[in-house]
Image (spheres, helix red, strand yellow):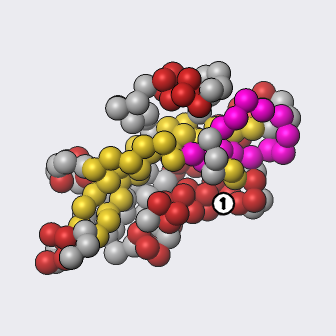
Amino acid sequence: MLPAVAQTLANILVGDTSLSSTEFIDFNPPGSELSGQPGFNLYCYSISECSKEEEIYPANSELINPPPQSSSLSTTCWFDVSFLISARDHTWLGTHQLLSEALISFLKHQPLAEELLAPELQGHGSLLLSMRPNAMINPATLWNSLGVPVRPALYITITIPIRRPN
C-alpha cells in the first residue's frame, strides 16, 4: 500500500507542477544539499492506525465519498500515512515556486478523488487528505532527526484502507 500512496502523490505532483516526470521525485529523506536538479523529496515519515471511523469520514463532510457498505469493511483497517514534501532547485526562489505549485495542487485535490488513486487504493471512495504535520511528530524534531536544518515543506497525511489479513 505504501508504494501506491507514494505513487499517487508523485503522479499528482507531476501532473500539476512544472515537473515533467516522476524521475525528479526522490523518495529519500531530504538532505542538506539544496542545489541541483529541480524536484521534490517525497518522504514518508509516519504511519499510524486511525482509531475512530468519524476521523476518516466526518459526519458533517459532504466532500468525502464514504466507502460502500459491505461485509468486507469489518476487515478493513484505516491508517494515516504522513509525508514530508520538500522542494529543491538551483535557487531559493525556484524552490519556493515548486513548493507553491505543490501546495496549490494538493489544495485542489482535497479530498483525493478515487480516479486519482493508484489501483490498490481504489474501491473505498475518495480518501481524506490533510495538509498539516502529524500531531505525534513536531516538524522541528523531524528535521532535527534527519540531520538537516528546518526549511519550508508541506506535510501531507492521507488516510488509507488496508485489508486485515484473515
Note whether 111 is above or below 88 in the view shown: below
Q: Position of residue 86 (x, y in %)?
A: 64, 38
Q: Is residue 94 visible?
A: no
- Residue 91 sits inside the magenta stretch: no
Q: Quadrant of the N terminus?
A: bottom left
Q: In this view, does 61 lie to the left or right of 96?
A: left
User: Which amino acid type is shown beneath numbered disc 1?
Assistant: Gly
Note whether 113 is above or below 158 in the view shown: below
Q: Is residue 77 left or right of residue 90?
A: left
Q: Is residue 3 left or right of residue 88?
A: left
Residue stretch in magenta:
30-43
Could you tell me which residue is drawn at 54 percent across and 28 percent down? 145
Could you tell me which residue is drawn at 57 percent across and 63 percent down? 7
Residue pointed to by mark 1 = 15
Q: Can residue 95 be seen in this view?
A: yes
Q: Where is residue 157 in the image (x, y as percent from the top left)?
A: 42, 46
Using a 10 Å C-alpha cutoff, classify the residue at mark 1 as few (fewer than 14 neighbours), some (14 to 19) or many (20 or more): some
Could you tell me which residue is drawn at 35 percent across and 31 percent down? 135
Q: In which quarter of the image is residue 96?
A: top right
Q: What element carries label 1?
A: helix
Could you tell me which residue is drawn at 36 percent across and 59 percent down? 160
Q: Quadrant of the C terminus?
A: bottom left
Q: Where is residue 5 in the image (x, y as percent from the top left)?
A: 49, 60
Q: Is the magenta stretch mostly helix, strand or loop?
A: loop
Compare residues 45 and 12 and report the one nearer the observer.
45
Q: Quadrant of residue 149?
A: top right
- Residue 31 sits inside the magenta stretch: yes
Q: Where is residue 12 in the image (x, y as percent from the top left)?
A: 59, 58
Q: In this view, does 156 lie to the left or right of 125?
A: right
